[in-house]
Image (tube, rainbow, N blue to C red):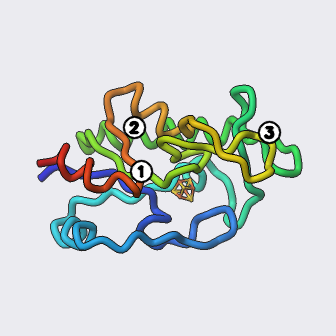
Amino acid sequence: MEKILISSCLLGALVRYDATGQKLSHLQITTWQQQGRIVSFCPEVAGGLPTPREPAEIINDKVITNIGDNVTIEFKLGAEKALRLCRQHDIRFALLKESSPSCGRNTIYDGTHSGIKIAGLGLTAALLEENGVKVFSEAQMPVLLKALA
Ligand code: SF4
């Protein structure tokens, strides 16, 4: 059965910058878990960043934390690892956390660390889309289910 890459935080893993998760409760996720179809992944942790970590935002093609550290290399590494994993498992669909500088599918923060969102993709979501993996946010579950049907 076809596998789906899912942001680890949406599965409840405590991997967000503030060491929390953001579990998405959906019957379909439980079913996928029972079927062994979920590949859980956190690009930022896979890229070598600690948890907790400073929040980061994309600005001018770089990823910068709220204290000015440049973490672009770690974010890019996480994105590359996500793509590698998708290729290993023949994954064509991903369900990623909206607005994250890695996982955001439709929106990201504007780079000023002031809570303002703009249209855009996180680094991992963009790399997956560029390479043929369709990415959906947690708000797009019905569209993902339709695509999988
Ligand atoms: Fe969740 Fe993605 Fe952020 Fe990891 S990088 S905590 S999976 S949104």
> Quadrant of residue 10 in the image?
bottom left
Tell me if mark 1 has few (under 14), some (14-19) or many (20+) residues whose alpha carbon lies within 10 angstroms of its own: many
Distance of mark 2 from mark 1, alpha carbons?
20 Å
- Which of the pair 99/123 is nearer the observer? 99
- Looking at the picture, how far across and down is residue 50, in whole percent? 69, 60
Going by the numbered disc 3, the residue's amino acid type is Asn
Going by the numbered disc 1, the residue's amino acid type is Ser
Going by the numbered disc 2, the residue's amino acid type is Arg
Q: Residue at x 61, y 64 (%)?
A: 16
Distance of mark 2 from mark 3, alpha carbons?
24 Å
Return the residue at label 2: 84
- Looking at the picture, how far across and down is residue 133, in whole percent? 32, 35
Q: Residue at x 67, y 54 (%)?
A: 49
* Element at label 3: loop
Q: Residue at x 72, y 31 (%)?
A: 62
Going from N to C along the chain, the mark reached first, 1 or 3, is: 3
Instruction: In the rendered structure, find residue 70 and report the number of the disc placed on it.
Output: 3
Return the residue at label 1: 137
* Element at label 1: strand
Whether pointer 1 and pointer 3 mark residues with C-beta atoms closer than 8 Å, the reply is no
In the displayed structure, does residue 42 sit left or right of residue 58?
left
Tell me if mark 2 has few (under 14), some (14-19) or many (20+) residues whose alpha carbon lies within 10 angstroms of its own: some
- Above or below, 99 relative to 35: above
- Looking at the picture, how far across and down is residue 72, in whole percent? 70, 36
> Quadrant of residue 15 in the image?
bottom right
